[in-house]
Amino acid sequence: MTVFSTPSHKVKIGRISYMNVAPIYFELDQQNGSDWFDILSAPPATLNHKMASGEIDVSPVSTAAYAEHQDDWIILPDLSISCDGPVMSVLLASRCTLKELDGKSVVISDESASAAALLRLIFMENGVKPVISCQKIDPDSGFLPDAEAVLVIGDTALNGKWQASYKYVWDLCGTWKVSTGLPFVFALWAVRKEFARKHPDRVATTLEILNQSKRQGCANMSAITTALQNYSLLDLDILERYFNGLQYDLDKEKLEGLQEFYLKLDQYELIPAPVTLRFFKPSPCFRTEPCFSQACCRP
């Protein structure tokens, strides 16, 4: 990895505590500590909260959380956790059909705002009004006796137990793809606007570090899946299929999918206001003033 000059204070970087971010943090994980940054690993919802409270400077954030904090956060370009079809790790497991969930109990994982927002959107588009509760889901359970359906995400969704315990299991990203024809973006990398204005050089360097690590990670997927096999206890073929379905850039199609998601959330009043995407843009002048570009998601 390129050697960067050490800032007077370390940059605090968030890391989702799921295996799906392993490619982006590939080179960072090879280091035994750093004089340049500290990494905090936590579930997505926890990172959203710590970004909002100013406890970390740069982090992956749920797309739904960005909608809530768009005035305070700026998106780092070309970084995301996305998919273009079924992804295996965002599942709605149910005892009955989607329509039959009207008025029934549905439990949502408390760890991902984006997955929860997507499910609420799917319910509203289908005219289904379940009784939704939010709680931590035991990854080893595979069954919730008091709920007609459960939303499970991340590593917990990959263990295969949900398909064995419930009659219906929907991959919500597959549902999104069929409905819109577009990719789905779970997470963006963002920086707090206050931090970016004070330290644009550190943000530009952090962006370079993350993108360089991502490039190396995507070039070493075989090593990543082999290492994760022992950690996760999942079969290698499951891990390979899972990572084959994940994408980590933020190209034009993904931005279109993101904009469509925000437009639908706004249409059904699931977010407080229409969303404007604001990007940090490194430039020759970044050492004195950050540059920003905007893309509006208003109808």
Image (cartoon, rainbow, N blue to C red):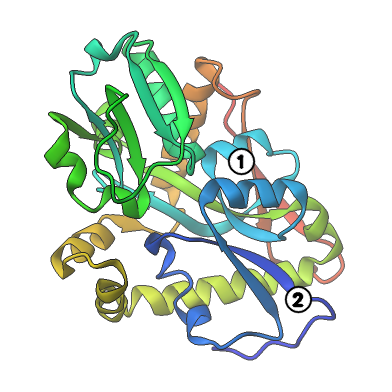
Tell me if I can see residue 130 in this picture: yes
Q: Residue at x 55, y 71 (%)?
A: 210
Tell me if I can see residue 180 in this picture: no
Neighbour class for label 2 at 10 Å: few (<14), some, many (≥20)?
Answer: some
Q: Viewed as shown, does residue 133 lie left or right of 71?
A: left
Q: Residue at x 61, y 58 (%)?
A: 59
Circle on res. 10: 2
Q: Earlier in the sequence, mark 2 or mark 1?
A: 2
Give the position of the N terminus as an image quadrant. bottom right
- Describe the element under mark 2 as helix, strand or loop: loop
Q: Nearer the viewer, residue 89 or 256?
A: 89
Q: Viewed as shown, does residue 44 lie left or right of 10?
A: left
Q: Amino acid at mark 2?
A: Lys
Q: Viewed as shown, does residue 222 lie left or right of 80?
A: left
To which quarter of the image does residue 32 belong?
A: bottom right
Q: Amino acid at mark 1?
A: Tyr
Query: Which residue in the rendered view is the most extreme toward the front?
Result: 145
Q: Residue at x 48, y 61 (%)?
A: 17
- Give above or below for 177 relative to 287: above
Q: Nearer the viewer, residue 214 or 239?
A: 239
- Give above or below for 272 relative to 139: above
Circle on res. 66: 1
Circle on res. 223: none
Q: Report x, y in % for residue 58.
A: 66, 61
Give the position of the C terminus as an image quadrant. top right
